[in-house]
Image (spheres, helix red, strand yellow):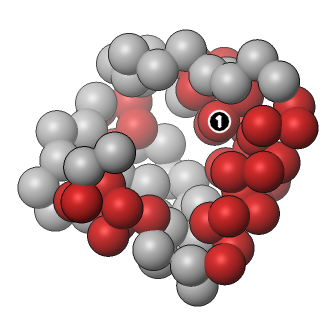
Amino acid sequence: VAMREMIVAQDVAGRKAASEKGFDYSQALKKSGITWTNDKLKLWLAHPARLVPGTQMSFAGLPNRSDVDDVVAYLDTLK
């Protein structure tokens, strides 16, 4: 993972989706109105296209629910 992505991950919870400068977000994500809560992050990490139809993420999601929970728990430690 690149340093830029790690720095961004440090304060993702509570942030509006597509609000971090320097990234090329899809129009769907920009218009989603999402604020990243743990529940929204879990949905995103499991199935990005289900949460935001039309997203252009090349990431298809984490198939294992425990992996999703682990990532969100890790993000919680970065608050």
Q: Residue at x 44, y 64 (%)?
A: 9
Could you tell whether 34 is left or right of 45 in the image? left
Mark 1 is on which residue type? Leu
Residue farthest to the left, as pictured: 22
Return the x and y of residue 27 as percentages of the image width and height.
Answer: 28, 32
Disc 1 is placed on an element classified as helix
**Vertical placement of residue 66 versus 33, above or below:** above
**Vertical placement of residue 72 versus 53, above or below:** below
The N terminus lies in quadrant: top left
Residue 19 visible (yes or no): no
The residue to which callout 1 is attached is 45
Count the marks: how many?
1
Q: Residue at x 49, y 67 (%)?
A: 12
The C terminus lies in quadrant: bottom right
Query: Residue 25 appears in which quarter of the rendering?
Result: top left
Q: Residue at x 18, y 47 (%)?
A: 23
**Vertical placement of residue 10 versus 41, above or below:** below
Return the x and y of residue 64 as percentages of the image width and height.
Answer: 83, 24
Residue farthest to the bottom, as pictured: 79
Query: Residue 43 appears in which quarter of the rendering?
Result: top right
